[in-house]
Image (cartoon, helix red, strand yellow):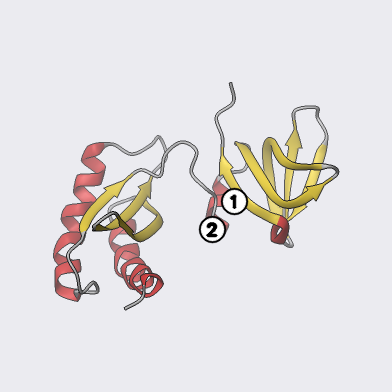
């Protein structure tokens, strides 16, 4: 099974369980680092995730992963928070992220820049709207965005 297939199967398996426990499933990652394979499930909830939250989800998912057996090699299973500067990937991320500070990298310059920081106003019709520090509003076509993530303002 390919890496993306493993991630899809685990996402489908984990989504209802994580939701049932009161968390949001943010991402599933299956990757090889050095000699080891890692299966990482990233969860979140309003107010952030604790170690106890991660343990609760891991205990719920472990028997289901064992039964489904979607990975044919040994791997290390981790459940964690996506972190304060996590990427925005889903429509839900954009909806929940409204009003939060974000950092955007584009593939090509827009108005002479490839990096933008500002408050996420939303995403509509494939355009991500930000309010920049100067008070200016900019719309960035989603297909021009290389990466968008939450950011911490210093």
Which image quadrant: the C terminus? Answer: top right
Q: Residue at x 40, y 44 (%)?
A: 82
Q: Hey, which quadrant is residue 62 in on the image?
A: bottom left
- Alpha carbon distance from label 1 to label 2: 7 Å
Which quadrant of the rendered structure holds the N terminus? Answer: bottom left
Q: Which residue is mark 2?
A: 90
Residue on which disc 1 sits: 94
Secondary structure of residue under mark 1:
helix
**In the foreground, 98 or 32:** 32
| Residue sticking out furthest to the bottom | 1
Dot 2 alpha-carbon crowd within 10 angstroms: few under 14, some 14 to 19, many 20 or more: few
Up the image or down, 68 lies above or below 96; here it is below
Task: Tell me which residue sits at (25%, 43%) in the image.
Answer: 53
Question: Looking at the image, which residue sits at the far right?
Answer: 111
Residue drawn at (70%, 61%), measured in percent from left and top? 143
At a point 86% along the width and 44% down the height, the residue shown is 111
Occupied quadrant, residue 77: bottom left
> Residue 101 at x, y = what percent?
61, 34
x and y, in percent, of residue 132 in the image: 75, 33
Q: Are marks 1 and 2 in contact (CB under 8 Å)?
A: yes
Q: Nearer the viewer, residue 8 or 122?
A: 8
Residue 98 in the image: state x and y as whole percent: 62, 43
Count of numbered tags: 2
Q: Is residue 136 left or right of residue 75?
A: right
């Amino acid at each position: 099974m390919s890496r993306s297939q493993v991630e899809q199967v685990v996402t489908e398996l984990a989504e209802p369980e994580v939701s049932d426990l009161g968390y949001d499933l943010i991402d599933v990652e299956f990757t090889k680092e050095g000699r080891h394979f890692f299966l990482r499930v990233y969860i979140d909830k309003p107010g952030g995730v604790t170690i106890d939250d991660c343990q609760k989800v891991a205990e719920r998912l472990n028997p289901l992963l064992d039964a489904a057996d979607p990975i044919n090699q040994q791997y290390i299973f981790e459940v964690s928070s996506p972190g304060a500067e996590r990427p925005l990937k889903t429509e839900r991320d954009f909806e929940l992220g409204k009003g939060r500070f974000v950092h955007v990298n584009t593939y090509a310059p827009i108005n002479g820049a490839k990096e933008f920081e500002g408050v996420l106003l939303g995403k509509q019709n494939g355009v991500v709207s930000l309010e920049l520090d100067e008070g200016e509003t900019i719309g960035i076509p989603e297909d021009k965005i290389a990466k968008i993530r939450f950011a911490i303002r210093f």
